Image (tube, rainbow, N blue to C red):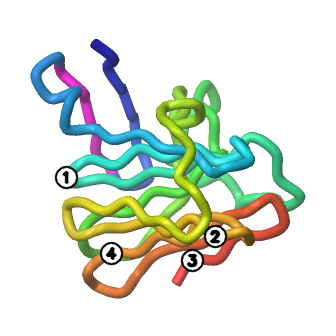
Amino acid sequence: MKQLFVVAALAGCALLGAPGAAADIVGFTSPSGNIGCMLSEDLLRCDIAERDWSPPPRPADCPDFTGYGQGIMLRPTGSASFVCAGDTALGGGPALPYGQFQAGGGMSCNSEPSGMRCSNSDGHGFTISRQAYTLF
């Protein structure tokens, strides 16, 4: 059984996939395989392997021994933020075909030829692609 350990320093929280909870985490990737996402009832995270953009500066509370800017995360309410973590959401599930979506916990992601577009019930979210990202 797969377990996912996510340390999200920017949000001041952690999602720990215990053996009983692992089934509640859904992984999916973009058809290109460049974007990988994980969705649980209280967290959505998408990481990117290759990108032509740089994330904003690393925040002071993101330790140097972790990765930063490789992905964006979102909760059921509130704004999206960049991931500060030592793991990855890449390769965690099957391809989500263009035009399809994955949803749960008040959050959803749409697979689009231009990248992944994810949002929550507040209307906040992000887009992520090789060319660019947006937080909204």
Residue 135 disc label: 3
Q: Position of residue 105 (x, y in %)?
A: 19, 61
Report which residue position mark 1 lands on: 41
Q: Nearer the viewer, mark 2 or mark 3?
A: 2
Q: Secondary structure at mark 3?
A: strand
Characterize the local packing of mark 1: few (<14), some (14-19) or many (20 or more) Cα atoms within 10 angstroms: some
| Residue extending furthest toward the left | 20
Report which residue position mark 4 lands on: 120
Does the magenta run of residues contain 16? yes
Residue type, mark 3 in image: Leu
Q: Position of residue 62 (x, y in %)?
A: 53, 43
Distance between mark 2 and mark 3 Cα atoms: 16 Å
Image-quadrant location for residue 72:
bottom right
User: Considering only order in the chain, which callout, 3 or 1, is on the residue closer to the N terminus?
Assistant: 1
Whether tag 2 and tag 3 are in contact, CB under 8 A, the answer is no
- Magenta residues, start to end: 12-18
